[in-house]
Structures are given as C-alpha cells and as structure tokens.
Image (cartoon, rainbow, N blue to C red):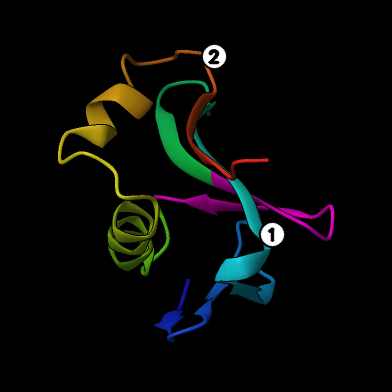
C-alpha cells in the first residue's frame, strides 16, 4: 500500500489492491477490526465515506504505519488507541474510532 498524504486527505491502496484518494471532508466513520486468517489475525482499518463507499486497509501493507499516524492525528485519538481498537486476538468486535457528528 502506498500512502501519500495531502492537506485535503490521502491517497492509498486498499486491501482490494485499488489505489484510492479519500478527501478528509468525505469521511464519516473510521473503525478498527481484526480479520481472522485462521492461524493469525490481521489488523484492519475501515473508512466509510459520504459516497457510501467503505475502504479497508491492512497492517500487512507497506503504508500501514503512515495511515495509522494520519488516522490518529485526523481523529485526535489517544496515544493508546491501538490497544482499545484491537483488544484481544481473534476478537470479532468492530471498534468505532471516530464518527462525524450529525
């Protein structure tokens, strides 16, 4: 996953290997979850947009840390947000990290 940040948002590759640009004003929800891959879990982030599209990102991609840093800054998350988003191995919980106020 390549990750390129701009003042208006970011461009990156999703788990579906699709390069996408997400404008920060189009984000309505950010959530964390684990994807059960049988013998191990993969950390994932999901970003829902006003266009009705949800983008999914994986820790296995090269730009993961840059994306995680961007999300932390954008959503003003606490420093220990990762432990709350991904509390235990093989959890099926989807943790909302940020949601736009309606």
Cα–Cα gap, marks 2 and 1:
21 Å
Q: Is residue 51 magenta?
A: yes
| Residue identified by numbered label 2 | 92
Q: Residue at x 84, y 52 (%)?
A: 52
In the rendered view, would you say 21 is above or below 95?
below
Q: Residue at x 79, y 55 (%)?
A: 53
Q: Nearer the viewer, residue 56 or 22?
A: 22
Q: Is residue 74 magenta?
A: no
Q: Is residue 15 left or right of residue 59?
A: right
Name which of mark 2 and mark 1 comes first in the sequence.
1
Residue numbers of the magenta segment:
46-59
Residue 55: percent from the left, percent from the top? 66, 55
**Identity of the residue furthest to the left in this view:** 79
The reply to whether callout 2 and callout 1 are in contact (CB within 8 Å) is no
| Residue identified by numbered label 1 | 16
Q: Residue at x 40, y 26 (%)?
A: 40
Residue 17: percent from the left, percent from the top? 65, 67
Q: Nearer the viewer, residue 95 or 25?
A: 25
In the rendered view, would you say 70 is above or below 20?
above
Q: Nearer the viewer, residue 101 or 70?
A: 101
Q: Is residue 42 left or right of residue 28?
A: left
Q: Secondary structure at mark 1?
A: loop
């Amino acid at each position: 996953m390549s990750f390129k940040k701009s003042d208006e948002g970011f461009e990156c590759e999703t788990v579906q290997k699709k390069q996408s640009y997400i404008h920060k004003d189009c984000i309505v929800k950010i959530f964390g979850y684990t994807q059960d891959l049988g013998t191990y879990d993969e950390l994932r982030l999901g970003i829902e947009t006003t266009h009705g599209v949800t983008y999914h990102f994986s820790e296995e991609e090269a730009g993961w840390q840059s994306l995680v840093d961007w999300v932390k800054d954008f959503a003003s998350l606490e420093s220990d947000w990762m432990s709350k988003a991904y509390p235990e191995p093989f959890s099926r919980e989807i943790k909302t990290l940020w949601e736009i106020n309606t």
